[in-house]
Amino acid sequence: MLVFVYLALHRDRKVGREELIEAVWPEQTRPRAADSALSSLLSKLRQVLGPDALPGRGEARLVLPGEAWIDLEAAAAALHRAQSAVALEDWTAAWAPARISALECAAEVGLGLGGPELAATERSGRRLIELEPYRESGYRFLMEALERRDNVAEALRVYERLRVTLREELGVPPGVGAQALHKRLLDRGSARS
């Protein structure tokens, strides 16, 4: 997942193998055959995404379809729209993107702090889903908050809601991040039985 995320964040350029190795494995945890391990990870990623999504061997560049949505890019764009609207004193135009950026920020902080702050993440996740039902970040924040509060069954229900919404409305599955979180929840649920 880390290879995918790194490539997604840098999808505007080719990323060299050494750079990817450094991003995935800090010096103290780097395997002896890091190049071979990276080849294996890239191969698995090609199996999941298809060979056209990750062309090349010496350098890697993630090629996603035009409708691909990267939450970090969307958050940055929303923040930019909000700041531009505020600069123009267009308060109505600033409201929605500012609110979404603030909710994502509050959710992330709640996850980072944990404990009683997970309730803030849960509230932010639910509100994000309400405001932007196709934005996967709200679902992921809510699922993670529920998981950390030991409510795996409810987190799985949230994933199912996301899956059905995307399938019925857009004909697409949830993104890699949501799918990985779903797998983790399933693994945790089966470990409890």
Image (cartoon, grey):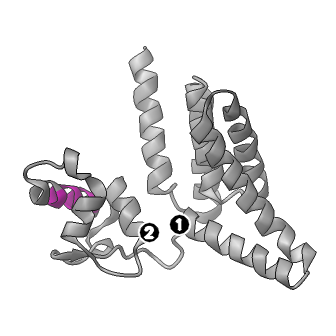
Q: Quadrant of the C terminus?
A: top left
Q: Is residue 72 above or below residue 16?
A: above
Residue 172 image point, x, y percent? 52, 61
Q: Is residue 160 visible?
A: no
Instruction: Out of 19 and 181, give the one closest to the viewer.
Output: 19
What residue appears at the point 21 percent right and 76 percent down from the top-left corner?
A: 59
Residue 152 image point, x, y percent? 56, 27
> For the magenta stretch, what is the residue range?
38-45
- Check disc 2 and report the residue beneath it: 9
What residue type is disc 2 on? Answer: Leu
Answer whether residue 42 is magenta in the image. Answer: yes
Q: Is residue 29 above or below residue 55?
A: above
**In the image, is 121 to the left or to the right of 57?**
right
Residue 83 image point, x, y percent? 77, 76
Which label belongs to residue 70? 1
Secondary structure of the residue carrying numbered label 1: loop
What residue type is disc 1 on? Answer: Ile
